[in-house]
Amino acid sequence: MMKAKEKAVKTLTGGIESLFKKNKVTYIKGHGKISAQGEVSVALNDNKGNETVKAKNIIIATGSEVTPLPPVPVDNAAGKIIDSTGALELKRVPEHLVVVGAGVIGLELGSVYKRLGAKVTVVEFLDAACPGMDKEAVKEFTKLLKKQGLDFKFGTKVTSSEVNGDVVKLTTEPSKGGDASTIECDTVLVATGRRAFTAGLGLEQMGIQTDKLGRIEVDDAFRTQVPGIFAIGDVIKGAMLAHKAEEEGIACVENIAGKHGHVNYGAVPGVIYTFPEFASVGKTEEELKAEGIEYNVGKFPMMANSRARTVAESDGLVKVLADKKTDKLLGVHIIASNAGEMIAEGVIGIEYGAASEDLARTCHAHPTLSEAFKEACLGAFDKPINF
């Protein structure tokens, strides 16, 4: 499995290098630092010296890094307390994996190792998984993960850790205060989030401002306070998603070229790649209530979908939120084996201002998982046919 992973990564990254060559993009391998206006100093890899690159425009797109958790220091080389990078390089399946953090990364990797045979315990500071996602959908999603055997300890914080040979001991206590307890395991995965990677880039000396989370401040055209310097992706505010960064990169370059690049952040999907997958785009019920927007809800269970039944992957549901007055699609939340693909229809609907009726009256091939989306849209403005 690891060999297949390494081959896929090598092929994909090699493909990017081929695109550089095809499009005559100069690729310099090293650590870059903005040394002056329109100038980047690069410390080349393998101690090959330094190189200075001059440019009219500079785009900072250095991504993010794991946010450290002081009570649980990561040492990927030792393989006992690891982060997401270490989790992708383990030489064996842990007997008992404790995941600290019930967000996207923790649940994705935790569910993988559970399916590979590990006992998995998830420790989360908050009272529920997936903060910020639709609470009803999260409740259903959590129920399915528990059904698979993941053990959740919500409202719990880790206060210390100790590695003794093959055993890691975590000391925990209730987030709101209470008696301490311990968990023993052989591997701990720290998955408490990521932060903008901006250290050593020369931002301070250039006068580039960052917020309290270390993210670079930009305007709608991705310009920093310094003329000719732009920033996109995980180093600026918003969800840390590769496809968001890609859209920002395209829009940023279009703006530099004198065009009108724009990203509709209300139509950027998010996917948790567990099994089943959990995908979402647009507003949650909680957000609509907070904004005082009246809405209708359409839901359809995957167990009533023919394709899901025939391939024995019938866990999950499709949930659609539409404006009560206009029927305009406001949010889509999908739990299904192929939710990451299914969500694209919701993204298109929101991007182009479709009504739930528009999508419900669109012919969907049978049998397909996408029919569940059609049925949920039917439920938002009338009622589903097949449930």
Image (tube, rainbow, N blue to C red):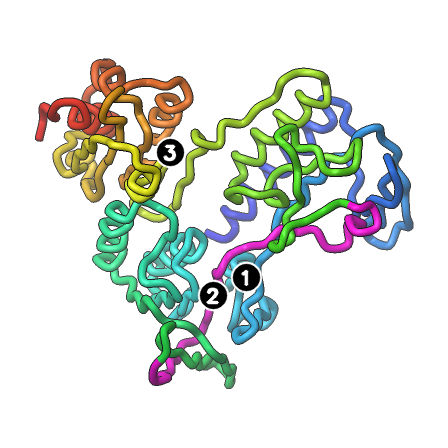
| Residue lying at 52% horizontally and 71% vertically, measured from the top left | 81
Magenta range is: 178-207
N-terminal of the two: label 1 or label 2?
1
- Foreground of the two, 17 or 286: 286
Quick check: can you spot residue 65? yes
Q: Do the residues bearing badges 3 and 1 touch, measured as CB atoms within 8 Å?
A: no
The residue beneath circle 1 is 86
Q: Residues within 10 Å of mark 2 (few under 14, many from 20)?
A: many
Q: Amino acid at mark 3?
A: Gly
Q: Secondary structure at mark 1?
A: helix
Please say whether residue 204 is one of the residues in the magenta stretch. yes
Vertical relation: 31 (above or below) 319: below
Q: Position of residue 163 (x, y in %)?
A: 51, 82
Q: Please say if the residues under marks 1 and 2 sit with CB atoms less than 8 Å apart.
A: yes
Depth check, mark 1 against mark 2: the one in front is 2
Would you name the residue on which mark 2 appears? Answer: 189
The structure residue drawn at horizontal position 34% and vertical position 60%, both measured from the top left corner, is 114
Work out whether 32 lies above or below 82: above
Q: Which mark is residue 282?
A: 3
